[in-house]
Image (cartoon, rainbow, N blue to C red):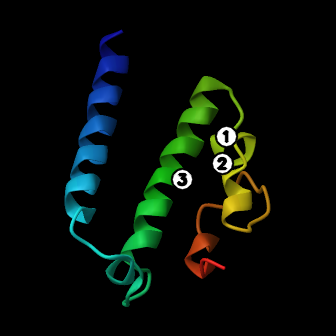
Amino acid sequence: MESARLVLDALGRVRDIVREALKDLSPEELLSPPKPHIAWLVWHLSRVQAANFSGLMERSQLWIADRWHARFAMPPNPKDYGSAHRYTGS
């Protein structure tokens, strides 16, 4: 159980740090150059974490099960951790 608490603590710290870093940024700033932009980096970080934990828990990825891929107009590819930098918001 100690290792589970350690992982939850680490993920909580990442979440808190990311929220603090993003809190004053506008949507334009999140999407401005250089590439990859800040929004993509946060998406990628979240996507990789979710994929890794779904594998450890032997569950479907929320990216697919909760249809997050559809919100980004992307195919439900469980191995795609990087193409959202092409997402335009349309």
Does residue 31 sit above or below 61 in this rendering?
below
Asked if the residues shown at circle 3 and circle 2 are in contact, with their CB atoms under 8 angstroms apart, the answer is: yes
Depth order, front residue of 12/89: 89
Percent across and percent down for residue 1 are: 36, 9
Does residue 80 sit above or below 85 in this rendering?
above
Q: Quick check: 84 left or right of 49? A: right
Q: Could you tell me how far apart the alpha carbons at marks 3 and 2 are, in whole angstroms? A: 7 Å
Question: Mark 3 is on which residue type?
Answer: Arg
Percent across and percent down for residue 4 are: 37, 19
Q: Residue at x 73, y 46 (%)?
A: 64
Mark 3 or mark 2: name the one nearer the start of the chain.
3
Depth order, front residue of 34/2: 34
Q: Which residue is mark 2?
A: 63
Quadrant of residue 27 in the image? bottom left
Q: Secondary structure at mark 2?
A: helix
Question: Mark 2 is on which residue type?
Answer: Trp
Q: Could you tell me how far apart the alpha carbons at marks 1 and 3 are, in whole angstroms? A: 9 Å
Q: Which residue is mark 3?
A: 47
Is disc 1 surrounded by few (<14), some (14 to 19) or many (20+) residues within 10 Å? many
Q: State the residue lying farthest toward the bottom.
A: 33
Q: Quick check: 25 left or right of 48? A: left
Q: Residue at x 60, y 77 (%)?
A: 89
Q: Secondary structure at mark 3?
A: helix
Asked if the residues shown at circle 1 and circle 2 are in contact, with their CB atoms under 8 angstroms apart, the answer is: yes
Percent across and percent down for residue 34 are: 37, 89
Q: Could you tell me how far apart the alpha carbons at marks 1 and 2 are, in whole angstroms? A: 5 Å
Percent across and percent down for residue 76 are: 78, 55
Mark 1 or mark 3: name the one nearer the start of the chain.
3
Quadrant of residue 13 in the image? top left
Q: Residue at x 24, y 45 (%)?
A: 16
Q: Which residue is mark 1?
A: 61
